[in-house]
Every structure is written in C-alpha cells, then in structure tokens.
Image: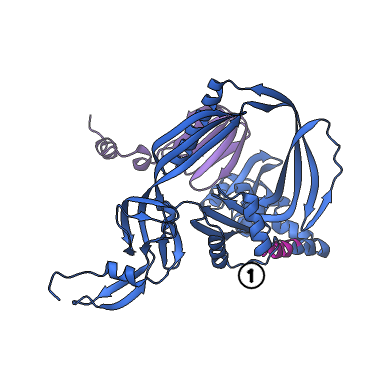
Chain colours: A blue, B purple
Amino acid sequence: MVRLIQYFFGSIFLEISGPSVERFLNLCAKQNLVLWNLKPGGNGYQCSVQKRAYETVLALAEKTGTSVRILGRKGLPFFLLEHRKRKVFFFGIGMALVLMFLMSQFIWEITVSGNERYSKSDMLKYVKSNFYQIGTYKKKIDCNLLEEHIREDHEGIAWVSCSINGTRLHIDIKESLDRKTKQNPRKPCDIVSNKKGTITSMSVKSGTPLVQVGDKVKRGDTLISGMIYYYSDDYQVTETSKIKADGQIILRTKEDYKETIPIATYEKKFISKSTRVESIQLLNWQLKLPIKEQKGDYDVLGEKKLLHIGDLYFPIGITTKKFEGYEPKRRVLTEAQAQDKLKKRLSAYVNDKKKKGIKVIKTNIQYERQGNDYIAKGTIDVEEPVGKIRNIKSLTKKQVEKITPTTAAPQ
Amino acid sequence: MKKKPKEALAKGLSLPRDVVFGDFIITLTGNEQVMIENYKGILSYEENQIAVQGNHVVLRIIGTNLVIQYYSMEIMKVTGEITRLEYA
C-alpha cells in the first residue's frame, strides 16, 4: 500500500554529500519530510524523497551547505512525463476505461437464490424469455415490475426481491414467509393463506385480522388485511386507509407423504473423471472448441464461468464440461434395507422441514411392498408459518361486518 | 535520598517514562529490524553504526549493512544485521 502511494506520487532518488549531512537529515525530519531507504553510499548518503518535497530538500541543502545529486526518478508522474508523446498508448488506456464504463451499463449475468421448488434454470428461462435478456441496458430494468410478475406467475413464491448489483441482476426468492422477509414489501399489502388448514396461533403486528385461532382456512383466504378502518364514537366508518399487513400465523396442516424405491437398483460406480473447455464466450457469440468423444457411459456436468471483479460481470467467459465415466452396478435391497432407506429419507424430509421453521407434529407412515417397489405411505401433521403477500383487495361486506366493533347498548 | 520531582511524578502517578522523561521507545524485532521513537536527531550514520541523540543520552546501533528504511520526526526504522544497542 505504501509502495503504491509512493508510486502514485512519484519519488526521487538522491545522493547527499558534504560536511554536515547529519544536520541536513535532522532538518529534514523537522520539516516533516519523510526520507526512506537511507543508506551510506557513494560520497555520502543515498535516500528517496517524495517528488513534491524536492524543492524543500534543495532549500535545506543550500542552508546546510550539502550538495544534492539526483540519481533517479521513479513513479507515475515521471512515467507520464516520459511517455507523453505516445498518444496511441494513452488513447488505448482511455478507450479501455470508456469501454469498461459502457459495458458496466448492461446486465451480463442473472442469478437466482433462495429457490427450492423452482429450479434456477426455470427461473432464468422465465426471466430471459418474458422480460430481460442478457445484455439489457440497466436503466431499462424495472425491478418492481419484475417482482410483481414473478410473484403473480409463480404460485409457490411468497416473497421476491430483484436487485441490480454491478452488472448482475439478482433475484432473491422466498418460498415460505418467515419473520425476516415479511417486513420488506414496499407497497401496502394483504397477507393471504397459501395452504389449507387450521389456525393454531396468530399474532398480528399491523393490519386488520380477518380470522381467528381455530378457524379453518382455504388457500387464497385473506388472513390479515392491509385495509384499516377508522370508526367514530357511534361505530360508523369515518375513514379507511391502506397499510402493509404484517404478522405471524401458524397453521396446522396435513400433508400426504409417499416415497417409493425399487427393489433392484442400478448404481453408478465412477471410474474416471476429466474436465474439458467446451467453448469460449464473448458477448453473445460462442466459439465452440472441438472435444474428443468419450468412451462408455458418463455423466456430463456443464459449468459456465464468467470473468468478474466482485459484482461487475463481464461478457467474457468459458464453459467447461466435466465428464465422469461410470459403470452400472446392480444392487438388490432386502426388506430391512429398503425400510431403513425409506426411514432415512423420511427423517431427512422432516429435518428439511425443521430447517424451514416448520414443526412436525405427528408422522403416520406405513411401509409395504408392492410388486417390485417398497413404498412408504401416510400423512404428516405439521404446524407451519403461512402467508403470502398480495396486493390489497377491498373487503367483502361479510368481512366488514365481522370486524365492525359491536356495542352492548340497545339499538 | 531525596527523589527528583520528575521521578516521583513518574512513580507516584505511574505515568509512562517515555512521556515524563522523553525516554527512547525501542522495538527490536529479531536482530534485523529496530524501530526507534522519541529521539531528537541523528548524530552520525555509517554503514555499521548509527548514533541517535535522545533527550539525555545517545543511542548507538551497531551492526552491519544498516539502512534507515524511513526517517521522520516521530519514528525511524532501521534494518540490517544488528549486533548491539549501546547507551553512551
């Protein structure tokens, strides 16, 4: 870092000689001039000083009667001075900067995170075919609109956020609502159910609750409305307004569970591995490289690597293909082994739920053999936070009646 | 024995000696690097000996291939093969 600064400002390498060099050095220190790489040599001492301190050095040298000789100049200012006639060189640097700036005005990479049910490639295909291609001008991208469309066109997505970082469009998806993500809607909204079940607990932070603990709700029912009503003293609605509904609702639901594994399976026994560069990409052009055919059976894993500095992605990259050769191997499971395997899958499934904040209350699973398969079948009772953000819908008359405060006074 | 007032100050208030007396602070790393703070100036400088003037005392750094890496009002860094530090 220090060297970088020294290079940037430029330094002069000096030889100092004369009768009272020590006095000169002490004066330099007094003037807050930093001398570095000071060593005896030549007739006196050699050291480096900053370029802009050189004039003071000369003045001090005159004062103390020492003689100063320049041995060399280093750094960016001298470099520029030396090469000032090389116009094409500077033009090249300028062009590179301009090009980099222009390139950074487009989207070169789209990434998706947080997806579980929808695959990454599906999401990318959806975005690329319906909305924005790679190489779209950044200012043309409307993140809010994209968010809304993604939410509307995908049933299972509860929350989505699109952002542009550098030259990357990032889409963050949540498929179930949890405490952290719910605070983020930008516009007033309702919270609706995305599951069918019975409410076991609810806490409303903002908005008008339309359901109670113990209620059975269907998918799409409004749980908390973002419409709020102001009442006068005699319970007439004076004013309504829209806010962001927020709260946590836990629903008890029943899920069907079915898992089948065949008795005899073929497993892959991997025997070889190799990676090849398949193509080189520049902007939207791809240069395919010849790849030698592989023998036997193999898995192919394709990977695309783009050149990037942090979040600034460039439209230059390579795609690689990884070949993993294997031999098929037949394996027959006994009943105990199969059951073991099924149980393991079930517990992995339950653990997966737990990680998502879903409580598994009861599992009711039976194991049986059916023809050439082992089957685990049954239901799982779970308690899970539900809720999905939706744009505000006005309340029905029935719902309005339900929330209107009643009075004990006779009518 | 009667203590000097500064001595008493340093001991009584447990103030650091470098503040009260302007003593050297010397940080020696192995035998190759030494950082010196709180000095007045350089008295002499040769390849195998550097004399530094302190507040009351002169410090001599003795070694071979001594180079002052940098030198400012507050701190200086000397590298080389250091064999001795001497007060005179």
Magenta stretch: give its range.
A96-107
Can residue A290 be seen at all in this image of the molecule? yes
Q: Is residue A139 left or right of residue B41?
A: right
A168 vs A287, left or right, is left
Residue under label 1, please give it.
Answer: A140
Of B83 and A117, nearer the camera is A117
Furthest toward the front, the residue is A371
Chain of the residue under the numbered disc 1 shown in the image: A
- Image-quadrant location for residue A222: bottom left
Q: Is residue A216 above or below residue A102?
A: above
Q: Nearer the viewer, residue A248 or A395?
A: A395
Q: Determine whether the residue tagged by mark 1 lies in a helix, strand or loop.
A: helix
Please state the horizontal and vertical placement of residue A10, each as a whole percent of the image: 67, 55
Type of residue at label 1?
A: Lys
Q: Quadrant of the N terminus of chain B?
A: top left
Q: Is A395 or A87 nearer to us in this picture?
A: A395
Query: Is the stretch drawn in magenta largely helix, strand or loop?
Result: helix
Is A104 part of what is drawn in magenta?
yes
